Image (tube, rainbow, N blue to C red):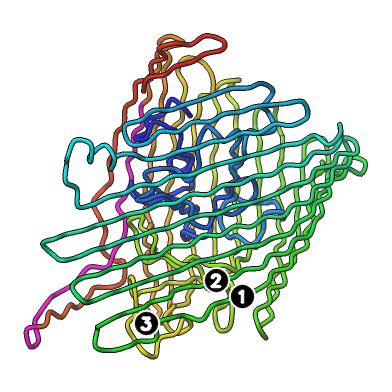
């Protein structure tokens, strides 16, 4: 993946996953993933099993993590494990490389837009890894005396610590923080806009392996995401603040009985959400400025099984029970999952998966251009939790050790989805989160194809997805079906890397996809010099076909056993 074209010169898992089957291309300035017709908040990025609720920097240009700190990516499109519940979409987890560090090392990446470094030091039974990343475009423009009305900067820090208490026990600590700032100042418009958004993560994990048949883990984490927007023009002032805090305790036991691999566990989450705090000054009226803060609790218990019924049939099953509590509101959800895998021939596998999922937290999107105005809500009061039922059938064939092909059919039915149709704010004294959010249903279906070559000088993959994603909301178009925003009928990608020599590698990416859906104005007329727009059916209009081609040239200036230097 490191040889693929990248604007920032570092690996971006979000952008790479958008090049795989079933994941819709959300555009160049959007950091969300839309998997099999789902919405933005259905596939939550995790860092060492901790959800990152603000998982994108501005416009989605930079990944939310420092690539030097990541050692493993876990991605499950069907999300069949009951351990990873409370999400309707895919399971995406980036894990630090602290477990694989056996010697001291130092890495640095100097880019045109940002730079990053990482230092790893093992000492006796202890290992730690520290990573730092920062942009400096604004500082560079100031040095050459370039006046810039728009200023943007971000920085993030990752720290991981591992201590081997014994040959069977480990203690791991992780910390991550990120901060983005965007400023716009126009003397001509007398406008001053400031946006700030931050993430904080702290997590600890205790692991104990009694033997190969028994492993116990205990986790605790704290994850917080917050954003603020301040707009000042003349005497008018708009302030918008939103935040979410998640505190969790979790314990797991992995054990084997005969030939059955099992995992059982329980978890507790406490959520504190400030969905949308709006403060206006000098507008001549005072609307209701704050949605009610939400404090809720989620208790879950789950069990997974993985075993072979016969020599050729593998069965994976999971079951999860959730109890969600907010004030006097109690809600229950049940998540059964099943996967059956048939190995009829040596190089061919057939499989069918069925999953019923639920999600008690929902991301409400108000922007499609990667600025932090989106906010989270919980299934409290009159807001139901989201539900889905998904079935998929697939064939996987290995032509040889290098070439793999995969074909999937899927159908995904979703209930109690959310839409917030008021853009950034709803200036209404009678506004409330239950009244302002629309609730409806959705469905998506399609097929996916992947052809992949994994080894050799010539590597890469080609994928194609045909899919259709529909929505139905009683308060939109009288309940008629309409297309989801990221309903793309066709999505075709080609990714190729070629190694001329061990020091010189080129990369090529080609993306062809149908355009996004949007609602267009049918006609515009004036009443008392005030423009009035009449709109067509919701999301009936479509942007032109999307076509993008990227090239990269990677040259290793120095590549020996202990030192490496690379020019991208």
Q: Rounded to the nearest whole Å, what is the CA distance between mark 3 and mark 2? A: 32 Å
Secondary structure at badge 2 equals strand
Q: Where is residue 423 in the image (x, y as percent from the top left)?
A: 33, 71
Q: Which portion, as a residue range, is magenta?
A: 508-529
Is 362 or 304 nearer to us in this picture? 362
Indicate which disc residue 321 carries: none
Is 98 or 33 nearer to us in this picture? 98
Residue at image position (57%, 72%) is: 378
Residue 509 located within the stretch drawn in magenta: yes
Residue that label 3 marks: 478
Secondary structure at badge 3 equals helix
Indicate which disc residue 273 carries: 2
Query: CB of mark 1 within 8 Å of CB of mark 2?
Result: yes
Q: Residue furthest right?
A: 258
Q: Is residue 168 left or right of residue 56?
A: right
* Predominant SS along the magenta part: strand
């Amino acid at each position: 993946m490191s040889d693929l074209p990248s604007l920032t010169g570092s690996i971006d898992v979000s952008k790479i996953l958008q090049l795989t089957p079933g994941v819709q291309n959300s555009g160049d300035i959007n950091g969300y993933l839309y998997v099999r017709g789902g919405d933005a908040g259905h596939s939550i990025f995790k860092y060492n099993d901790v959800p990152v609720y603000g998982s994108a920097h501005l416009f989605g240009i930079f990944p939310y993590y420092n690539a030097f700190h990541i050692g493993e990516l876990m991605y499950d499109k069907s999300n069949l494990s009951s351990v990873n519940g409370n999400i309707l979409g895919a399971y995406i987890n980036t894990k630090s490389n602290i477990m694989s560090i056996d010697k001291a090392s130092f890495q640095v990446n100097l880019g045109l837009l940002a730079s990053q470094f990482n230092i790893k030091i093992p000492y006796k039974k202890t290992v730690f890894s520290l990573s730092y990343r920062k942009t400096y475009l604004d500082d560079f423009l100031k040095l050459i005396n370039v006046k810039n009305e728009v200023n943007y900067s971000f920085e993030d820090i990752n720290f991981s610590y591992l201590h081997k208490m014994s040959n069977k026990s480990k203690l791991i600590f992780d910390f991550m923080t990120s901060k983005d700032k965007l400023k716009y100042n126009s003397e001509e418009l007398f406008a001053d806009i400031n946006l700030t958004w931050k993430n904080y993560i702290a997590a600890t994990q205790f692991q104990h392996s009694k033997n190969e048949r028994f492993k116990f883990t205990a986790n605790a984490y704290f994850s917080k995401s917050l954003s603020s927007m301040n707009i000042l023009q003349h005497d008018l002032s708009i302030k918008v603040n939103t935040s979410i805090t998640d505190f969790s305790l979790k314990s797991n036991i992995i054990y084997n009985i005969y030939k059955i691999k099992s995992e059982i566990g329980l978890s507790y989450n406490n959520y504190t959400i400030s969905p949308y705090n709006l403060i206006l000054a000098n507008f001549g009226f005072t609307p209701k400025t704050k949605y009610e803060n939400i404090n809720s609790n989620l208790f879950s218990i789950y069990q997974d099984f993985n075993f072979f019924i016969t020599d050729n049939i593998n069965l994976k099953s999971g079951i999860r029970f959730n109890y969600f509590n907010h004030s006097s509101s109690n809600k229950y959800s049940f998540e059964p999952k099943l996967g059956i895998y048939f190995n009829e021939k040596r190089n061919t596998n057939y499989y069918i998966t069925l999953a019923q999922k639920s999600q008690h937290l929902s991301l409400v999107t108000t922007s499609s251009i990667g600025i932090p105005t989106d906010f989270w809500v919980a299934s409290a009061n009159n807001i139901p939790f989201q539900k889905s039922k998904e079935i998929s059938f697939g064939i996987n064939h290995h032509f040889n050790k290098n070439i793999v092909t995969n074909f999937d059919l899927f159908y995904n039915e979703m209930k109690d989805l959310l839409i917030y149709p008021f853009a950034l704010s709803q200036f209404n004294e009678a506004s409330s989160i239950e009244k302002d959010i629309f609730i409806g249903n959705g469905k998506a279906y399609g097929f996916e194809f992947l052809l992949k070559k994994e080894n050799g000088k010539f590597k890469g993959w080609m994928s194609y997805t045909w899919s259709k994603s529909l929505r139905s909301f009683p308060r939109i178009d009288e309940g008629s079906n309409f297309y989801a925003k990221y309903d793309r009928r066709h999505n075709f990608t080609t990714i190729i890397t070629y190694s001329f020599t061990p020091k010189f590698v080129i990369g090529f990416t080609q993306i062809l996809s149908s355009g996004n859906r949007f609602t267009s104005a049918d006609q515009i007329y004036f009443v008392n010099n005030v423009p009035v727009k009449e709109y067509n059916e919701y999301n009936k209009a479509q942007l032109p076909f999307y076509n993008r081609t990227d090239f990269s040239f990677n040259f290793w200036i120095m590549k020996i056993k202990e030192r490496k230097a690379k020019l991208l």
